[in-house]
Image (cartoon, rainbow, N blue to C red):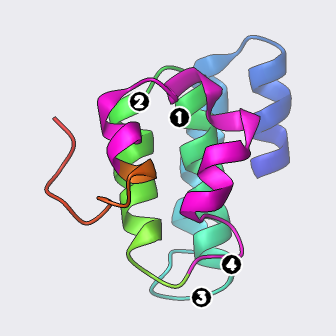
Amino acid sequence: MMQLAWVNLALGHKAEALHLAHQASESLPIGKDAIGGPYFLSGLAEIEAQTGETNEAIGNLRQLLSIPAGLFVSIQRLRIDPVWDPIRNDPGFQQLLAGKELVGPHE
């Protein structure tokens, strides 16, 4: 489903891409699977970042940075991965990069 979300995004179908990414992350939440859950939540955050859902993406990244999800999301990876370029200049994203990921919700 996550790959299909990326295909829809590439085709310009942002709403369908978000829908599929949400479906994928809800199909295997972190509480049910400590490996697959973070993978799907990070994929959802990537799709959200690409579709302008900045606050949602940052909220999901904040959650991922608060748990052992280094395979999929880490501050170092956020700094260099171009998938985050659409939200790179957002103050909330900059807080994450500064290591302030556990500070209150993004405003």
* Residue closer to the observer: 94 or 40: 94
Q: CA distance from mark 3 to mark 1?
A: 22 Å
* 79 part of magenta stretch: yes
Between tags 3 and 1, which lies in front? 1
Q: Residue at x 76, y 50 (%)?
A: 2
> What whole-number distance in Å separates the C-alpha atoms at marks 3 and 2?
25 Å
Secondary structure found at label 4: helix
Query: What residue does disc 3 label?
Result: 33
Q: CA distance from mark 4 to mark 3?
A: 5 Å
Please state which amino acid type lies under the numbered disc 1: Glu
Residue density around tag 2, few if under 14, some if 14–19, many if 20 or more, within 10 Å: many
Front position among marks 3 and 2: 2
Work out whether mark 3 precedes mark 2 in sequence or the reverse, and give the earlier one: 3
Q: Residues within 10 Å of mark 1 (few under 14, many from 20)?
A: many
What residue would you read off at disc 2?
Answer: 54
The answer to the question of whether label 4 and label 3 lie on touching residues, with beta carbons closer than 8 A, is yes
Q: In the rendered structure, does residue 70 fall within the stretch colored magenta?
A: yes
Reply above or below: 52 against 23: above
Position of 98 relative to 27 (above/below): above
- Cα distance in 3D space between marks 4 and 2: 23 Å
Report the span colored magenta.
69-95
Residues at marks 4 and 2 touching, judged by CB atoms closer than 8 Å: no
Q: Which mark sits nearer the N-terminus, 1 or 4?
A: 4
Locate the C terminus and report the quarter of the image it occupies: top left
* Dot 3 alpha-carbon crowd within 10 angstroms: few under 14, some 14 to 19, many 20 or more: few
Q: Which residue is mark 1?
A: 48
* Residue at the limit of the structure toward the top, as seen here: 12
